[in-house]
Amino acid sequence: MAGRVLGVIGGSGFYRMPGLERVEEIELDTPFGRPSDPYVRGSIGDTQVVFLSRHGRGHRFLPSEINYRANVFGFKKLGAEYLISVSTAGSMKESIKPGDLVVPHQFVDRTFKRPATFFGSGIVVHVSLADPVCGDLAHDLLAAGRAGGATIHAGGTYLCIEGPQFSTRAESRLYRSWGVDVISMTAMQEARLAREAELCYAVLTLVTDYDCWRESLAAIDIGEIFRVSKANVAIAQKAVANLADSLGRRERTCVCAHALKGTIITDRAAIPAGLIRDLQPLVGKYLQ
């Protein structure tokens, strides 16, 4: 099926999306402020691709400073149905090596400074986040990565910490005892907001290091992280391009497109009209 729209959020080292045709830049305002950067829209095969640099060009924003709500709302406003988050991470398991890719299925959230919902201020919504990743999209992303030659792991748990500092060794050992697979600082808020925006969501994690739990290694070296990340970016870009090429031929049959159905708790008459107007891309089909 033609006409699918794939959103791509690029993280550390993944600052652009090569291979796009008919490229244009789009600047947006949202009810939540300005996104991190202008969106770049183009096409790969039958799929329209909308790309955004999560940290802004030049890597200007800390993980805690990113306007996650504006970023995801902008994708929704531009018609995205799918959202891929590309994120660097540390490995919490020996079997997941620097240079590998991971497509996690679960999250543990250890952040505490970040707005994590579009709602409030007069409208209460409770969506399910039991399975925060779209199983269909994760399956397709995994296949796209393997087709591009990546060493890629299916499933696992992504631990999201506040940062910007990396973990202490004591924290890292504690997190390992929880059985998590990778540790990073950004994808959890995107998962929450993508669910509220009824977007199919998946994460492509680029593993750069072993965090600091591995006593045989020195503490995390940011230079080494960026060296490994740079080597991985081309593989990740190829995986995303393969995914975009395949989405134009796949029907969207998962439940993500109806995630808000039945979850708006507030009486319709009690919701401010201005709020409904502001949130029209999200709630319009439910609050006519």
Image: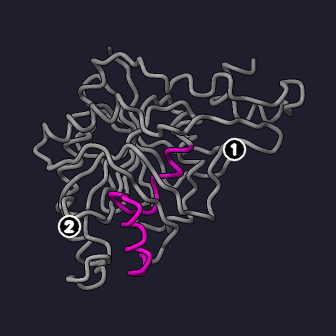
Q: Amino acid at mark 2?
A: Val
Q: Magenta includes 176? A: yes
Which of the 4 image quarters holds residue 88?
A: bottom left
Q: Who's the residue at 46% across and 77% down the image? A: 165
Q: Nearer the viewer, residue 16 or 201?
A: 201
Q: Is residue 7 above or below residue 179?
A: above
Image quadrant holding the N terminus, namely top left
Q: Is residue 135 above or below residue 97?
A: above
What residue span does the magenta drawing correspond to? Answer: 167-192
Q: Amino acid at mark 1?
A: Pro
Q: Who's the residue at 46% across and 58% down the image? A: 186
Which of the 4 image quarters holds residue 169?
A: bottom left
- Near mark 2 (Cα within 10 A), the count class, few <14, some 14-19 or many ≥20, is some
Secondary structure beneath dot 1 equals loop
Secondary structure beneath dot 2 equals helix
At which x and y percent is residue 143?
20, 34
- Mark whose residue sits in front, 2 or 1: 2
Q: Which residue is mark 2?
A: 228
Q: Residue furthest bottom?
A: 218
Whichever of labels 2 and 1 marks the residue nearer the N terminus, that label is 1
At which x and y percent is residue 174?
42, 71
- Near mark 1 (Cα within 10 A), the count class, few <14, some 14-19 or many ≥20, is some
Q: Who's the residue at 31% across and 66% down the image? A: 90
Q: Residue furthest right?
A: 270
At which x and y percent is residue 182?
34, 59
